[in-house]
Image (cartoon, rainbow, N blue to C red):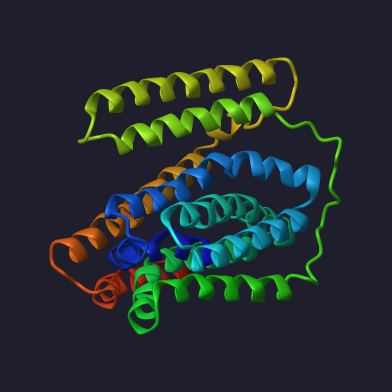
Amino acid sequence: FICSFAGSNMNVMINDISRDLDTTVKGVQTAITLFLLIMAILMIPCSKLTDRWGRKRCFLWGLTLYGAGALLSAVSPNLGVLILGNSVFEGVGTALLIPPVYILATLWFDDMTSRAWAFGVISGLGGIGAAAGPLIGGLITSGISWRAAFVFQALVVATIVLLSRRLEDPLPPDPTRPFDGVGAALSGVGMFFVVFGILQAGSNNVLFAVFLAVGALFLAAFFLYIRRLERKGKEPLLSTGLFRNRTCNLALVTQNIQWLLLMGSSFVVSVYLQEVRGYSAIKTGVIFTAATLGILFSSLA
C-alpha cells in the first residue's frame, strides 16, 4: 500500500512542491518518474538478492531505506534533495522490500485457495494505495503541508518495521547462490533508455527515437545473454521459461494494463486538473475516489 501510495500521492502536490522549492512542474514530475524508474530497474535484481541475503533481511533493509528517504524528502530544501530522498532512497527501498512480500506470501500459503486470497489482498492494497494516494495526499497537503505527507509515509513504515520483528523466513539465506551481475546491468540500462526515451516524446522526437532504439538493443542483448546462460546450465537473472506459462503471461499482461491505466491516468489527470482547471490538492484527490472504490471491490471479488 505505502509503496503504491508513494507512486501516486505526489501527483496532487505538484503545485505546492514546485512553489515551496522554487522549481517547475517538470522538475517535480521528473522526481516522480525517477522514483518509478529506479524501482523498476532494480526490482528483478533485488528479487534475486533475497536468495543470498534472506527475504526478511531484504524486507527490513528496504523498509529502513524507504523510511529514511521519506524523512529526507520531508525536510528537503530544494529539488535535488527531494530527488535523493524520494526518487533514490525510496526507489531503492521499494525495490528491496516488494519482492519479499510476494515471495513470503507464496511460501507461507501453500494451498491454492489461501494463496489466491493472500495475493488478492496484497494486489488490492497495492491498487488502493495507488488510487487513494491522490486523495490522502490531497487531504494532508491541504490540511497541513506536502511535507507532512512524507512524514505520514515514514510513520507507516516505522509501524510495519515494528510489526515485522516476529516474522520468520521459511528458507535460510544462501550466500553462495550465484548472482547474474551482467544480466542485471543489461536489463537495467535497457529499461533506463526505454523509459528515458519515452520522456522525450513531444519535446525532442529525435532523442525519443534514439533512446528507444538503444534501449531495445540492450534488452535484446539481455534476452540473448540469459538464453545463452540457460543453455550452459547456469542460473540467469530471469528464466525465459517463465514466459512459456500461459497463466503467468495472462497475469502479466493484465497487471501491466491495470497499472498503465491507473498510474498513467493519475499522472496526467492530476497535472491537468491543477494546472489547467486550477483545482486544489484536495479537490484533485476527490476525483480519484471512484478508482479507489472500484479497485477495492474488484480485488476482494
Residue drawn 80% across and 59% down?
A: 169
> On screen, 262 above or below 299?
above
**Is residue 148 found left or right of 274 in the rendered image?**
right
The answer to whether one can see residue 110 in this image is: no
Residue sitting nearer the eye, 157 or 225: 157
Indicate the position of residue 172 as horizontal and vertical percent values: 86, 51
The answer to whether one can see residue 117 in this image is: yes
Residue drawn 62% across and 63% down?
A: 68
Quarter where residue 61 is shown? bottom right
Residue drawn 41% across and 43% down?
A: 253
Indicate the position of residue 217 as horizontal and vertical percent values: 45, 18
Indicate the position of residue 255 as horizontal and vertical percent values: 43, 50
> On screen, 50 above or below 106?
above
Residue sitting nearer the eye, 10 or 230: 10
> On screen, 70 above or below 216?
below
**Is residue 259 found left or right of 248 in the rendered image?**
left
**Is residue 67 found left or right of 37 in the rendered image?**
right
Indicate the position of residue 211 as horizontal and vertical percent values: 36, 25
Q: Residue furthest left?
A: 277
